[in-house]
């Protein structure tokens, strides 16, 4: 596998990286910013993406997803969802309240996908008005 891209509806990649490092500590997968493989027109878009460097084992992927879940739990984002997508279009969406058994299944699926992406979203978070909340 190698890398899993991480995206979030309400956090920048930098904010998400900081929050996940706090959750995962030194035992979690390494998080890095990489240049996006896509070219953007204009200067408003950040040309970097956040990736987690993981081994092929689903245990490393499970640790990453567990870190994402802890991050959501700490923020009390109970309606948040995690979507796992592969380059072939395979997509699995789970709630932040995922069971340990389902987490193992999701980690196994992620470890088998080509170019996986983990996306964090939530209906309540997109509807928040006023100043944005910090990610961590």
Image: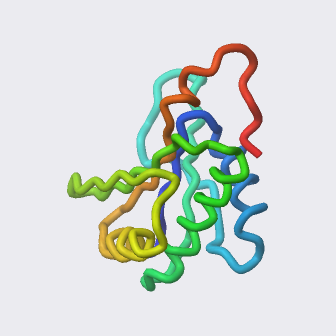
Q: Residue at x 61, y 42 (%)?
A: 77
Percent across and percent down for residue 118 are 45, 55
Q: Residue at x 50, y 83 (%)?
A: 59
**Rendered image quadrant of residue 117:** bottom left
Residue 125 lies left or right of residue 55; in this view the side is right
**Rendered image quadrant of residue 86:** bottom left
- Where 104 falls versus 69 (above or below)? below
Percent across and percent down for residue 42 are 53, 21
Q: Residue at x 75, y 53 (%)?
A: 18
Q: Residue at x 50, y 36 (%)?
A: 122
Percent across and percent down for residue 11 are 64, 38
- Quarter of the picture containing the N terminus is bottom left
- Where 32 falls versus 43 (above or below)? below
Percent across and percent down for residue 35 are 55, 50
**Rendered image quadrant of residue 23:** bottom right
The answer to whether residue 1 is visible is no
Way the structure is coloured:
rainbow
Residue 113 lies left or right of residue 128; in this view the side is left
């Amino acid at each position: 596998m190698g890398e899993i891209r991480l995206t979030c509806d309400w956090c920048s990649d930098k904010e998400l990286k900081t929050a996940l490092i706090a959750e995962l500590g030194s035992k979690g997968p390494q998080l890095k910013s990489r240049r996006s493989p896509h070219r953007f027109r204009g200067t408003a878009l950040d040309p970097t993406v956040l990736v987690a460097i993981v081994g092929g084992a689903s245990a490393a992927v499970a640790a990453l997803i567990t870190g994402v879940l802890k991050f959501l739990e700490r923020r009390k984002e109970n309606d948040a969802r995690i979507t796992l997508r592969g380059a072939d279009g395979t997509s699995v969406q789970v709630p932040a309240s995922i069971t340990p058994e389902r987490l193992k299944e999701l980690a196994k699926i992620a470890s088998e996908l080509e170019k996986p992406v983990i996306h964090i979203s939530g209906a309540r978070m997109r509807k928040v008005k006023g100043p944005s909340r910090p990610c961590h």
